[in-house]
Amino acid sequence: MRELLRQVSRSFYLTLRILPGPIRPQIGLAYLLARATDTIVDTRLVPVRMRISALREMRLAIQEAADGRHPRIPDLGELADAQAATAGEGSEGERKLLETIGLPLAILRHLDGADRALIHEVLEIITRGQELDLVRFATACLEQVVALETDTELEEYTYYVAGCVGEFWTKMCLAHLLRGEEVEELSLLADGIRFGKGLQLVNILRDLPRDLRQGRCYIPAGRLAELGLLPKDLLDPETIERFRPLYDLYLQEAAEQLTSGWAYTNALPPKEARIRLACAWPVLIGARTLSLLRTRNVLDDRQRIKVTRSDVRTIIFHSLLAYPFPSAWSRLFRESLPKPRKSA
């Protein structure tokens, strides 16, 4: 399972490695199962109806394993074959994950009952959101861009995909690491949700040109209409100046949600260095991504906006150096945030 995690989790594997032992297996397992369902959804060589059917079979298998029963292992062979035909990064690991899906399901079945319930809860939310996404974008393609309609739909989407993960993460920490600690549980849960939603909003903004070329637009059509734009207009990089006022609003919203993620990180007891670092790294990488997004034309798909591995190593190194020194630690996030755009 560790090798599978390394192959499919990419940058998140760094976070998994530093997680405290009492929660590392549960979060790693939940990640693998969520990655499997995400791979099902994203295997575009397979018809939508078949992906929906496989997703529902996975949901049922997860529920059976979480109940402590022998799960019916879904036959994901055709999806795995489609992954073998995909040249994208991580496709080989995703193929192996689909072929060996019985392993994480078996591990889930043998976990503590409370942990099984938390993993089932988060995966139920994630898979419901994934199915909704499949149905919503069933006809989407380059020639027919389909968009979310409202900010409410965007809020729901970011919760289904990542906000619920922040909630799950927090509940795991409360159950295994923070018993008897003086923490504001409700505040921590709320910030955990905003933390996850902020990371997903960063991903939406970063991946905008790629999603548009697959016919998916997560920027609500109603907000675009206020600027006299249609979702398909965002395929033209020259549209950036008309789009920029709305784009900057979403950048600011993402920064505010990451600020909640930083508050979440610092609400954890300082002695829990591993979990604080595991939270700090995605916050700092997200803030660095926002800084890049602020300076580039995000609609130009020739400009791949991505924090480099070298930058990630630098972020990790600086965080480790700063951790013992509160003033240096507090500056890490503030200095990573994008600077306000200068007026013309």
Image (spheres, rainbow, N blue to C red):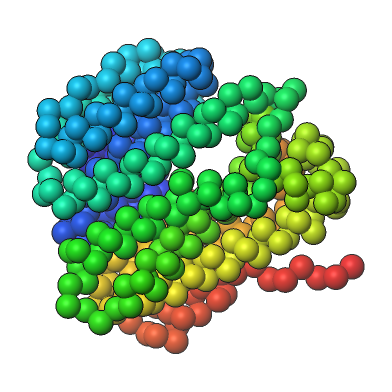
* Residue found at x 20% / y 22%: 72
Q: Name the residue nearer the viewer: 106 or 309.
A: 106
Q: In the image, is residue 236 above or below residue 334?
A: above
Q: Quadrant of the C terminus?
A: bottom right
Does any portion of residue 283 appear in the rendered image? Answer: no
Looking at the rendering, which quadrant does residue 139 occupy? Answer: top right
Residue 314 rendering spot, x and y as whole percentages: 46, 63
**On the picture, is 120 further left or further right than 146?**
left
Does any portion of residue 58 appear in the rendered image? Answer: yes
Q: Name the residue nearer the viewer: 17 or 172.
A: 172
**On the picture, is 160 further left or further right than 74?**
right
Q: Quadrant of the N terminus?
A: top left
Q: In the image, is residue 5 above or below residue 60?
A: below
- Total residue callouts: 0
Q: Name the residue nearer the viewer: 274 or 179.
A: 179
**On the picture, is 39 further left or further right than 100?**
right
* Residue found at x 28% / y 16%: 75
Q: Name the residue nearer the viewer: 127 or 327.
A: 127
* Residue found at x 37% / y 66%: 189
Residue 76 rendering spot, x and y as whole percentages: 32, 18
Looking at the rendering, which quadrant does residue 291 occupy? Answer: bottom right
Q: In the image, is residue 238 above or below residue 261?
A: above
Residue 243 rendering spot, x and y as whole percentages: 80, 51
Looking at the rendering, which quadrant does residue 337 occupy? Answer: bottom right
* Residue found at x 68% / y 43%: 149
Residue 266 rendering spot, x and y as whole percentages: 38, 77
